[in-house]
């Protein structure tokens, strides 16, 4: 009888599987992603390596010495760490972060626009106290521009009513407003000393949301040639809430990591972050195999660094605010070992 | 990276796969990725050449602690090992910019 090994579900809860069952989870995960992404499944050698990682009973797993990658931490800091800038210093001095990120709890460029002066002051303080690079991060958050929070029509209401043209027009109007806000906020924070801007969860509200982020990146790159610009995605597929939007001839709806990476780097970003969401009812092994299969094609087309998103609920990491380190460390290692990512 | 508690997310990732930040040369490699869009392999090689160390040394805290001190690039300190004469963050970043050929801000 095969011994059982403690592993994790996508919600972080412990489950015991045999080595054969873990192997099946990995095979099913890569098969599911390959079918959805129309991408190749992971190879036998890659699955064998993942099996070694996930069938180990060790509490922790890590990359080989020499294979370390850059960690770009978004959302750096929690209330227990004191002020926001205190937290950044702790990330630098105590947590060995390679970069950190100043952010406002209302993680939206539209919201930050109204308090950008205060955010600039915080960035100035951060730059005076921290040596590692400091990003400023927020989300494009296009939904904020629709009724009742913004001036544009609400496409989430218009679409179910089959008012398609109105829904599309509302999104196009929102894009124009969002681009102006993002360029304004990013420029102000860069002028205050930010080493880079993080457009986090780009595409969360669909293809219009993603287009707004790309246009903002394009304008910022033209204005600031040395600005660090990171675009982290919201999910593995860009939803077609508009359906007809294009960036430089590429239709955005339906783009997967390979296509996302192409347009992000064409827009002028310096780091691209694929995000593959977690299925909480499947195992971490299944989710990691699925995530790696989705992300692998983008590594071949990337001219800029790829930092895979491996935070809560993406990249195989359990959807739990207090993730067990046995699962997180396996996801971390798997991304580096299999994808050869430039960072996480 | 992403949200999650401090032990479960940043600490776990940093121990599993990180370049050790200011404890070693992770921030320097990160700066080249961010500012120049340089891929990891090239960024590591460029930093190693600029520092006069091997690529394998870049995540080694013992080697890099000494190098950072000599080149005044800033470094971590702890209760019994303090560096009151080390540069301020602004001075350290100016030295880093010069070392890596990054533009003035």
Image: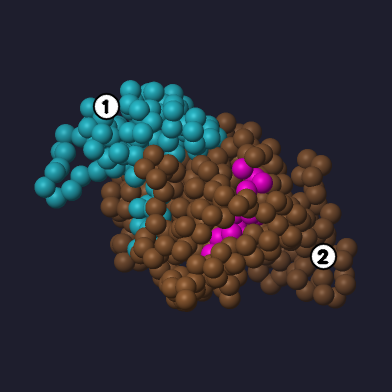
In-front residue for pair A283/B74: A283
Vertically, is A264 above or below A84?
above
Q: Residues within 10 Å of mark 2 (few under 14, many from 20)?
A: many
- Residue A46 % position (x, y): 56, 51
Instruction: Assess whether residue A45 is covered by the magenta stretch.
Output: no
User: Which of the two discs, 2 and 1, sits closer to the camera?
Assistant: 1
Residues at marks 2 and 1, CA–CA distance in whole angstroms = 58 Å
In-front residue for pair B64/A300: A300
In-front residue for pair A228/B51: B51
- Residue A126 % position (x, y): 36, 47
Q: Which label number is shown at residue A307?
A: none
Q: Residues within 10 Å of mark 1 (few under 14, many from 20)?
A: some
Q: Is residue A32 left or right of residue A321?
A: right
- Residue A265 % position (x, y): 65, 39
Which residue is the site of mark 1? B71
Q: Are marks 2 and 1 on the same chain?
A: no
Range of magenta residues: A284-299
Q: Is residue A81 left or right of residue A225?
A: left
In-front residue for pair A157/A232: A232
Q: Is residue A21 visible?
A: yes
The hue of chain B in the figure is cyan
Name the subunit of mark 2: A
| Residue farthest along the left direction in this orientation | B80
**Colouring method of the image:** by chain
Q: Is residue B29 left or right of residue A236?
A: left
Q: Which label number is shown at residue A167?
A: 2
Question: SS class of the residue under badge 2?
Answer: helix
Q: Is residue B93 visible?
A: no
Please identify the dominant SS of the magenta region: helix
Q: Residue at x 60, y 70 (%)?
A: A279
Q: Residue at x 36, y 34 (%)?
A: B56
- Residue A214 % position (x, y): 68, 46
């Amino acid at each position: 009888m095969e011994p059982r090994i403690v592993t994790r579900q996508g919600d972080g809860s412990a489950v015991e599987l045999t080595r054969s069952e873990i192997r099946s989870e990995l095979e099913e995960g890569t098969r599911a992603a390959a079918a959805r992404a129309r991408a190749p499944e992971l190879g036998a050698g890659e699955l064998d390596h993942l099996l070694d990682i996930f069938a180990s009973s060790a509490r922790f797993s890590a990359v080989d010495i020499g294979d370390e990658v850059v960690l770009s931490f978004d959302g750096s800091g929690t209330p227990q760490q004191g002020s926001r800038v205190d937290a950044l210093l702790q990330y630098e001095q105590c947590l060995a972060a390679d970069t950190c990120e100043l952010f406002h709890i209302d993680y939206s460029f539209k919201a930050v626009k109204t308090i950008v002066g205060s955010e600039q002051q915080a960035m100035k303080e951060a730059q005076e106290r921290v040596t590692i690079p400091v990003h400023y991060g927020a989300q494009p958050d296009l939904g904020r521009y629709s009724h009742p929070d913004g001036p544009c029509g609400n496409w989430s209401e218009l679409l179910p009513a089959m008012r398609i043209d109105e829904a599309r027009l509302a999104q196009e109007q929102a894009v124009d407003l969002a681009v102006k806000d993002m360029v304004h906020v990013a420029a102000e924070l860069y002028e205050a000393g930010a080493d880079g801007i993080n457009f986090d969860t780009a595409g969360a509200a669909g293809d219009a949301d993603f287009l707004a982020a790309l246009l903002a990146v394009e304008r910022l790159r033209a204005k600031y040639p040395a600005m660090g610009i990171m675009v982290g995605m919201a999910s593995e597929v860009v939803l077609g809430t508009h359906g007809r939007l294009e960036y430089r001839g590429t239709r955005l709806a339906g783009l997967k990591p390979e296509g996302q990476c192409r347009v992000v780097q064409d827009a002028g970003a310096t780091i691209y972050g694929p995000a593959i969401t977690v299925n909480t009812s499947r195992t971490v092994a299944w989710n990691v195999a699925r995530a790696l299969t989705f992300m692998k094609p983008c590594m071949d087309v990337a001219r800029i660094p790829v930092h895979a998103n491996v935070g809560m609920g993406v990249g195989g990491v359990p959807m739990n605010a207090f993730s067990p380190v046995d699962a997180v460390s396996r996801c971390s290692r798997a991304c580096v070992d299999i994808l050869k990512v430039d960072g996480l | 990276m992403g949200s999650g508690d401090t032990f479960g997310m940043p600490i776990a990732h940093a121990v599993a796969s990180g370049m050790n930040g200011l404890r070693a040369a992770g921030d320097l490699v990160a700066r080249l990725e961010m500012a120049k869009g340089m891929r990891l392999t090239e960024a590591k090689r460029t930093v190693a050449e600029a520092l006069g160390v091997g690529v394998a040394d870049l995540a080694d805290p013992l080697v890099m602690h000494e190098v950072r001190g000599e080149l005044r690039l800033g470094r971590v300190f702890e209760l019994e090992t303090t560096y009151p004469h080390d540069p301020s963050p602004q001075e350290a970043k100016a030295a880093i910019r010069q070392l890596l050929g990054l533009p003035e801000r």
